Amino acid sequence: MKIYDLIGIGFGPSNIALAIALEEQKQTGHHAESFFIEKQPSFAWHANMMLDNAHMQVSFLKDLVTMRNPASHFTFINYLHQKNRLQDFINLKTFFPSRREFNDYLAWAAAHFDHCCAYGEEVIEVLPEKKGDEVSLLRVRSRDNAQTVHERLTRSLVISIGGHPRIPDCFSSLKGDARVFHSNNYLKEIAQHTHAQKIAVVGAGQSASEIFMDLHHRFDTTQIDLIMRARSIKPSDDSPFVNEIFNTDFTDYVFNSPEQERSKILNEFWHTNYAAPDLVLIEQIFNVFYQQKVAGAERHRFLRRHVVKKALAQPKGIQFILQDLNTNKERIVTYDAVVLATGYHRDHYKSLLNPLMPYFNDLKVDRQYRVCSTLHFKPAIFLQGACEASHGLSDTLLSVTAVRTSEISQAVINLFSQSKSLQAKRTMSSALV
C-alpha cells in the first residue's frame, strides 16, 4: 500500500493553507507527498451561513498565505486579479470582503488540489501500524457515500475538522426534531419553515445577530425572539492594541506562559472572539427595535437576561420554559422553529484518536501543534483549530492560519528528511553486512 508523508483530515481553510505551504516547499526541493480527505461532497465553507450582506470579520490580508508569503500565487489579491475584479475591489475601499466572495476565494484555492483530495469520504478511524514494539505508521480508514471503506497509510497526520455544533443540555432531548436546528444548518433548515409565525433565536454572538436580521428581512409578519443570557449585545473589540493578541508572535507569548497565566489571557480577551458581533450589525438590530417603538407595534422581542430552563416538543410547537434572570420569574412560550446559534465544540478530534490513546499521556501539543506521544510512537499528529487553550484565541481564526501551516509544513519536511536519512543509513549498513 502506498505510504503518504502526510494525510490531512478535513479540507477547509486550514488544510488548504497547509496544502499550499507544502506545494511551495517543493520549489525549494522538499517533496513531501500529501493527501487530504473531506467528508463534504465538494468544497464548501459555512455554506449554510452565506447570508446576504454578511461580511468577513478578518482582513483579507489574513488569507491563506499572505502573512507567510505575500508573493504567493494563492493570495486573495491574486485571486481578485485572476477573476478580473482587482480594480473594482480596490474601489470598494474595504479590508472585509463579503463572506460569499471569500468562500469563492477558498474554493478557487482548493480547486488547485483536486488531484490530492478525496471528497465525499468521512474518516471513521485512525489505527496504529506496528513494526515490532514501535508504531511506525498510521492507517487512516474512511468511508465514502457508497459505503465503501478506503484505507491509506501515512507517516504523519493533520486533523483540521473544524467545530462540532454545541447543543445546550436543555435541547438534547429534541435531537432529530426538525423544528430545532443549529446555525450550522441555518439556510438549509429555514427553507423548511416558510410558514412559521414565531421563531426563537438563541445566542448572543455574530451568528445569532446575523440570523436575527436575516429572519427580519426574510419574513414580513413572523415574530422573532432573540434570547440571550447577557444584559446587552456587546460589540467585538477590534481596536489596534487589542488586535495585537491575534498577531503571530503573540502565539509564542501565550504558549510560553504558565497555564494559569494563559487562562487569564483567554478570559481577558474572550469577548474579542465570542458573543461579540460587529458594531454595525448591533446598530442594525437596535434600529429594528427602535422602529417598532416608533410604529407602536411589537413584532420582535429582545429577551435579554433570559435562559431556557426547559425545551419540550409539543404538537403545536417547541415549548420553552424561560426564566427572567432579573425578576426570577418564569414564562412559557411556544415557537414554530428554534435556531440555536450556540457555538461549537472543538474536541471532536478526540474520538478519532481514541484507538491511539495508549500512546499519549494526554493530548497536549507542542509549540508546532504536534500531539505529544510516547517514545515508541513515531508518526506525527498535528492539530489545527483545536489548540486555543495552549496557543491563544487566534487558533480557531484565520489570523494565524498562514504562519501556523508554515510551522507544521516545516515540521513535516523535517520529519520526512529524517526518515529519508535514517532509511539511507539502514540501506548502507545492510550493504556493508
Image (tube, rainbow, N blue to C red):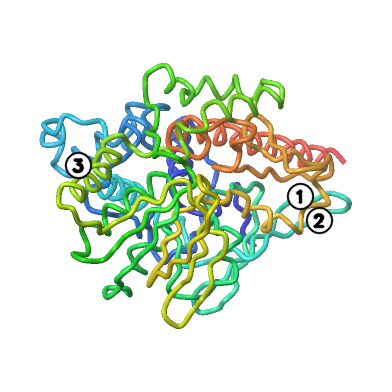
Residue at left 49%, top 23%? 245
- Residue 187, by quadrant, is bottom left
Residue 299, above or below 376: below
- Mark 3 vs mark 2, foreground winner is 3
Disc 3, disc 1: CB below 8 Å?
Answer: no
Q: Residue type at mark 1?
A: Ser
Residue at left 49%, top 46%? 229
Q: Quadrant of the N terminus?
A: bottom right
**Mark 1 — residue?**
136
Q: First in sequence, mark 3 or 2: give its number.
A: 3
Cα separation between marks 3 and 2: 47 Å
Residue 67 pos. (x, y %): 40, 27
Residue 68, above or below 287: above
- Residue 374, by quadrant, is top right
Q: First in sequence, mark 1 or 2: give its number.
A: 2
Residue at left 74%, top 37%? 422
**Mark 2 — residue?**
130
Residue 82 image label: 3
Q: First in sequence, mark 3 or 1: give its number.
A: 3
Circle 3 — which element? helix
Residue at left 84%, top 38%? 432
